[in-house]
Image (cartoon, rainbow, N blue to C red):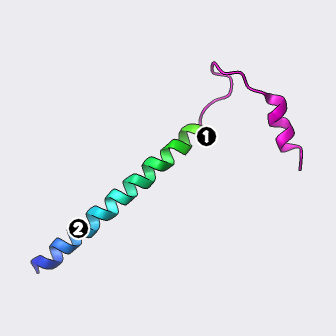
Amino acid sequence: MIVWDLVTSIVLLVVGVVVAAVLTFAAFFLVFASDPCGSGTACDTGRMGSASSSR
């Protein structure tokens, strides 16, 4: 029985580390997505408009 406890603990530890790494990686994209336009940086709204109207 103790062997299964050890295996389960190791598997859950590895899964937890992988999930933490994925969430940390995704957090960088959240920072880019939530970066507001105009908070000290100049935004080129003409370029942003041309990207959405080029379809």
- Please give the residue where the numbered disc 1 appears in the rendered image: 33
Q: Residues within 10 Å of mark 2 (few under 14, many from 20)?
A: few
3 is within the stretch colored magenta: no
Q: Position of residue 50 (x, y in %)?
A: 86, 38
Q: Residue at x 37, y 53 (%)?
A: 20
Q: Is residue 29 left or right of residue 5?
A: right
Element carrying mark 1? helix
User: In this picture, is 27 found above or below 20?
Assistant: above
Q: Is residue 4 left or right of residue 30?
A: left
Q: Is residue 5 left or right of residue 50?
A: left
First in sequence: mark 2 or mark 1? 2
Q: Quadrant of the N terminus?
A: bottom left
Q: Residue furthest right?
A: 54
Q: Residue at x 40, y 53 (%)?
A: 21
Q: Residue at x 74, y 26 (%)?
A: 43
| Disc assigned to residue 54 | none
User: In this picture, is 26 found above or below 7?
Assistant: above
Element carrying mark 2? helix
Residue type at numbered disc 1: Ala
Q: Position of residue 12 (x, y in %)?
A: 28, 66
Q: Position of residue 46 (x, y in %)?
A: 84, 30
Q: Position of residue 35 (x, y in %)?
A: 60, 32
Residue type at numbered disc 2: Ile
37 is within the stretch colored magenta: yes
Estimate the spatial distance between the alpha carbons at disc 2 and disc 1, rounded to whole Å: 35 Å
Q: Is residue 31 left or right of residue 48?
A: left
- Please give the residue where the numbered disc 2 appears in the rendered image: 10
Secondary structure mostly seen in the magenta stretch: loop
Q: Quadrant of residue 53?
A: top right
Q: Which residues are magenta?
A: 34-55
Q: Residue furthest bottom?
A: 1
